[in-house]
Amino acid sequence: MSVPFLSFAAQHDPLREEIMAAIGQVYDSHYYVLGESVRQFEREYAAFSGVAHCVGVANGLDALHLALIALGVGEGDEVIVPSNTYIATWLAATFVGAVPVPVEPDAATYNLDPARLEAAITPRTKVIMPVHLYGQACDMTGILAVARKHGLAVVEDNAQAQGAAWQGQLTGSFGELNATSFYPGKNLGALGDAGGLTCQDAALAERVRTLRNYGSQQKYYNERIGYNSRLDELQAAVLRVKLPHLAAWTAERQRLAAEYDARLAGLPELILPRTAPGATHVYHLYVVRTARRDALQQHLAAAGIGTLIHYPVPPHRQQAYASLGYAEGAFPLAEELARTSLSLPLWPGMTPADLDAVCDAIRGFFH
Ligand SMILES: *Cc1c(COP(=O)(O)O)cnc(C)c1O
């Protein structure tokens, strides 16, 4: 049998009629940009996240970018980012003319290590951008303590962790402005690109609303240099149908992860994901590590099992960031993760037989 890395069928098939009806409503409304669907979804996603405001934008990268503009980050500033993240986190800093300053993760959780933050802070540092990587909430107590002490803002990159919590508080509700992505493969995904920001502060929310819409609050009156980065009515309508199911999908991801934990335990060459006390993990990805990663991936592919590597090259070693001049070895933990990480199939609707096939193939490899 073959097991794909990801399948949307079990999530989308039961909702087909409801999603098509929601799309039909937008179609019939003849109103396609910044209408009722976006307003309603923003209200519902803010409530879900335990914040006062949500602002829908075109994608997760734009959400990160607009957050930094709204906070006044610019030329010559420094933004602290994880050394092991998707490149989007770094790009947002670069877009505003700031320098991304990488900090190595905690070796057990792969999330930003508060103990390493202070060494990276300079008089130019403006923002700390924690990423709740793979779906596990960062130690926000530690990160916020450092931020407060040094007068820095926090922008959470919550693209992978919708519904995760640190000490009972949801991710996306800690920072001054927080970004998320509704890219199809995320835990809450649209049928195309989409993203959002969450925050408690009405003035910051207003600033981002203006920035996403040409720097304008009143049509054809532009108060600042803005962008076109609006969440689409059609995508908002789809997200409204999916959001009420997110908690159940998360529970299912956690059940599947616990099953992997149990079935893959005791293999000396395989490191399983670990969740820190105080954090919840919503398993956007179930990432294992082994020194024989490439061989394991090939073995699984031969058995018809899809896997992916998140991420094969850390941002500091990407050609795009050659100008920063980081040599091999500059961030050894990020490089080690890039060499050893493998993401196993995991999606709501994955069957026990799917999971059996993956676990049997992995045990067969290490046997
Ligand atoms: C997906 C992702 C983004 C970017 O989201 P897009 O909607 O694809 O622009 C940013 N940060 C992280 C950690 C992500 O996983």
Image: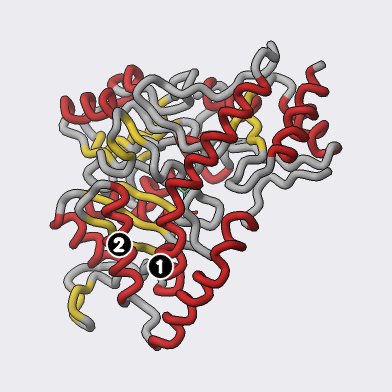
Q: Residue at x 54, y 45 (%)?
A: 320
Horizontal side of residue 162 vs 147, given as left or right: right
Q: Is residue 110 visible?
A: yes
Q: Residue at x 26, y 43 (%)?
A: 173
Horizontal side of residue 205 vs 227, given as left or right: left
Q: Earlier in the sequence, mark 1 or mark 2?
A: 2
Task: Answer above or below: position of 322 versus 260.
Answer: below
Horizontal side of residue 180 vs 198, given as left or right: right
Quarter of the image for residue 313 reads top right
Task: Answer above or below: position of 191 versus 176.
Answer: below
- What residue would you read off at disc 1? 236
Q: Residue at x 24, y 70 (%)?
A: 215
Q: Are marks 1 and 2 in contact (CB under 8 Å)?
A: yes
Q: Residue at x 32, y 22 (%)?
A: 114
Q: Nearer the viewer, residue 360 or 68?
A: 360
Q: How many marks?
A: 2
Mark 2 C-beta to ligand 1 under 8 Å: no
Q: Nearer the viewer, residue 25 or 214?
A: 25
- What residue would you read off at disc 2? 42
